[in-house]
Amino acid sequence: MVVQRAAPVKGRPRPAWLRRFARNGAGMLGLVGVVLVLVMAFGAPLLAPHDPARQYFDGLTLEGDPLPPSRQFPLGTDTLGRDLLSRVLFGARVSLLVGVLANGAAVLIGLLVGVAAGYFRGAVEAVLMRLTDVMTAFPALILAIALAAILRPSLWIVALVIALVNWVWIARAIYAQVLSIRQREFVEAAGALGVGTFRTLFRHILPHLVSTLMVFGTLGISTTVLLEASLSFLGVGVQPPAPSWGGIINESQSYFLDAPWLVIFPGIAIVLTSLSFNLLGEALRDALDLAERR
Amino acid sequence: MIGYLAQRLLQAAGVLLGVSIVTFLLAFLLPADPARMIAGRSATVQTVESIRQQLGLDRPLPVQYVNYLGKLLRGDLGRSYAQKAEVTKLIRSRLAPTLQLALAGILFELLIGLPAGIVAALRRGTAVDQAVMAFAFVGVSAPQFVVGLLLIYVFAYLLPLFPLGGYGTPLHVVLPAVAVGLAGGGWYARVTRSAMIDVLRQDYVRTARAKGVFPAKVVFKHVLKNAVLPVVALVGLDIGVFMGGIVIVESVFGWPGIGQMIWQAIQLVDIPVIMGGVLVTALFVVVGNLLADLVYPVLDPRIRYS
Amino acid sequence: MKRTHTPGSLPPRPRQHGVLRRLGLAFGALLLSASLVHAQEQGGSAVVSFQDDISTLDPAIGYDWQNWSIIKSIFDGLMDYVPGTTELVPHLAESYEVSDDGLTYTFVLRQGVLFHNGREMVADDVRYSIERVLNPETQSPGQGFYLSIAGAQEFIDGAADSVAGIEVVDDYTIRFTTSEPDASFLHKLGLNFAHVVPQEAVEAAAGDFGHQPVGTGGFKLKEWVLGQRVVLERNPDYFEEGLPYLDEITFQVGVDPNVAFLRLQRGEVDILGDGIPAARYTEVINDPVLGEQVAMGEQMQTGYVTINVAMEPFTDVRVRRALNMAINKDRIVRIVNNRAVPANQILPPLFESHADDYEGYPYDPEAARALLAEAGYPDGFDTELYAYNVAPNDRIAQAIQADLAEIGVNVELRTQAQSTVIEAGGAGQAPLLWSGGMAWIADYPDPNNFYWPILACASNIPGGWNWARYCNEDLEARAARADTLARSDQADERVAEWREIFLAIMEDAPWIPVFHELQVSMHSTNVTGPKEIFVDPMHIPVHYEMVRRAQ
């Protein structure tokens, strides 16, 4: 088959998937979004107009309330008189770490458990699914409080707790899908033909799971960012004054009716991040034809 | 089938046992002293120690656990350290509201999520699809406390359509259920959509459509039944998780659910109440997942259990 | 801001023998109650909102700021405080005498006081109630307050069947004998723990008296829907004429403060039990209409940072003083919307022993840095600050962190659940601890309550609430002596002595006193009453029996 070359202006040939990707408008939008968030995370020290921990005496009204957006504070101030824009910029690091890494780990664990239980059935299924039951009922809150008191607060602990707790959702959803997929004719046929287990899993089952994984991987970013805030509140993760988007929302949410900017701007950041990753992911999946393979 | 159910029952007992041990250990791992919390600020050492003795907290952990298990098997969940009342009484008073909110929440999740997901899958790539996508992401990213407060402010305060939180009549459950349903609905919509898209691509679906079978029949008979499998999984989990109480929604709406009870118990290190609450949660988790597992073969007859 | 009535660390003057005095007292009490009561204004109902569930209404057990005043409405004790003030007066007792040596207290009880179950209260009930608190099986947090009664320890240890120091002389006379003069004994008889309970009701409740309270108070329990509401109704046989004003009072629980505020504006809630939500505070205070519904008053409270004097570098008093000079208290008060006054000493202004002319440590970061350098830390040092994670304490902790950073002290924050912070403090693990949210509100208006549990050598033990690990043997001896000054003619000496003791503690600087919180409550236009009863320093937060329906 002849590989079509890209526009002859550039000498180098471009792979097909890249061209398909470039044509996808939503995907490009997603790419821009992800790049934007990465710039925020890495470029925060250069971009932030103020020190995110600096509590300005006149960052609050005379009675101690946060200020709305102004020239000095483009996104307003928070309940301690700190610049919101700077905090949102610096908060990108935490949120990216937690949202992408912790959530990613949860998705990976859930995938392994769900596939193993759904494909191998029998005792493996029973043990893994009952483990899922235990972890769902598991009082993560108490674990978090206990860890907060015993260990030095660190983002890695939060990431660990999140991964430990969130994988059950992916596991159960994947398990249900695998149960159905493995019954499909081609899988049984492949089995009869003597195709190896891993080959079967990889070529016949996994592609059907990609879309679901994509959903959990991207929508889950939002959930984990908010979950991180609750855990840090208990003293496990990011300690004040280090900012995180979920944390800013958490400490300002009862002010919502009076100082909505404190929830809206970090909220926009969260939506932007997870949506961008989703658009990017779906465009890549379509371009690489990942799910189309049988 | 009976054999399978019997197996599951046995496994359920194992799960409950496992959860009880883990929670027991965790509760005592907490560097917080229940005896001291009860004794309060002005207590003498003597008072603290005497309370510790009265509660049996001075005995070794395994002994305490065995005692707890013994009482549990007789249906006695012990007495709250802080309130002195029987834990079963405390849980019973909150069971009905928690169940009501859980079921109503799941209902709204499905009402909001399923149609949205189906429409998005069928109209993939169009503006409708993108609108549903955006709504889903906003719904999931919106903090539940803010959503709840906003719902109350707009629909109960500015427009007196619903009560300002509280529990009692069917009207009371609407706003809290919507608050729960908006976030969950976003998840259900996306998961439904992606599962449907996968199924829509199957050969046999294409064949059916090519044969000219009426689209609606195709959708609802073949596609939906298979696509909704992961959603069933999520509903099963939701049953369990919601019965553990949704603290944030409960606290904004003043809903007398188990979540608030467990949360306060954690603050006070009221271990019997914590244990009782977690065990009730575990019970419903097991039930919820079992129900989901029983529904799969109904949706896809090729799935079988040994 | 309104000041509530008379600071009262003065122990009430012991009565001398004399029928005339007792008659005069009774007449005076009658006049006082007549002037307070407007019999015409009885009736109506009110709703109070709370976020936390009410844990128990058993006076021997209940010990949080939420159920304290509800219990006081259902039960009574020998002594009580004039509504809205810290002035101690006899309540269930008609009169009392204290012997010359200060060891014997004889109370004459009112006659015809009925429990909610119809039976008349007699002296034996008082004995039963206090023995119940001392009994280890009850698990009462208040057990330690009554150890000064002779024979209490033997009773607790099981060596005696009853407390030797409690003597029921006859149905309406009861006598207490203490093993040593205890200047705050009468205050302790005003605590909830000493409120009178009927034995038959306690036993009938089979361990759940906390949900089935029966007392002598102005309100009795009508309905308790667990997790939702507690409804109290008027006790028609209440011995105080004309009280309570309301026919019924409902406590709604589980209500978020922001939603409670909305309910108040709709008229569904009459008193905000948790106060005005912080986000709305400024708006409400400045509103001409809403502002009228707000009551503000002082509390016997101090918010402070404990400095662990046993840990390096805090073993050096210069370091501790430097920390005291680094905190910008005005800014912190502003962060809590001015709902507090900056504190320069340990005792709040409500106490007579409060030193009005004491200046304390000024806010002077320059001098603080210099002092640190002198102590050998010119570049500062690293340390940790523990705090309760619920707002506004996490913000206050961050403000403290920022202030200390200014003088080179790098503070890592540990904001955690309350129980773990208390545990860390008790274990002596916390170098610095912000006490907010767990902060000290005095049990009774006597300065010794600010010393013994939190600053004494006696409480400098593992698990003790003396988180600063402070122990000064000389001051301990002075404090013990001051507490034996029980006679009325020694009152002034005692006030002065405690003032000196606390100033001496400030020299040692084991604490950084930051502010004294003000009590703020808001009520709807449907209820009214003297402002003081909405911010009652003893019937915290609201004196429910004194709340009236507005005309």
Image (tube, rainbow, N blue to C red):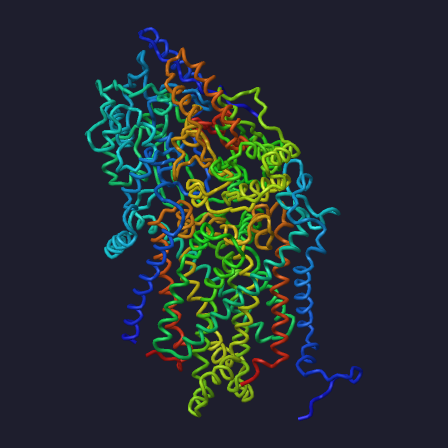
Which quadrant, please, contains the N terminus of chain C? top right
Camera-nearest residue between C396 and C39: C396
How many marks are shown on the rendered structure?
A: 0
Camera-nearest residue between C399 and B45: B45
Vertical order, B236 against C226 (above or below)? below
Instruction: Indicate left or right for C162 with C428 as reference.
Output: left
Report whether residue C523 is seen: no
Instruction: Indicate left or right for C473 with B205 as reference.
Output: left
Q: Quadrant of residue C293?
A: top right
Report whether residue C419 is seen: yes
Image coordinates of residue A211 in percent, x first then y, are 55, 75
Q: Residue at the location (69% across, 89% down)?
A: A3
Vertical order, C486 against B237 (above or below)? above
Camera-nearest residue between B188 and C461: C461
Image coordinates of residue C26 in percent, x first then y, are 35, 13
- Which residue is farthest right? A9
Image coordinates of residue B276 in percent, x first then y, are 34, 53
Q: Residue at the location (57% across, 82% down)?
A: A292
Image coordinates of residue C236 in percent, x first then y, are 33, 27
Q: Quadrant of residue B287?
A: bottom left
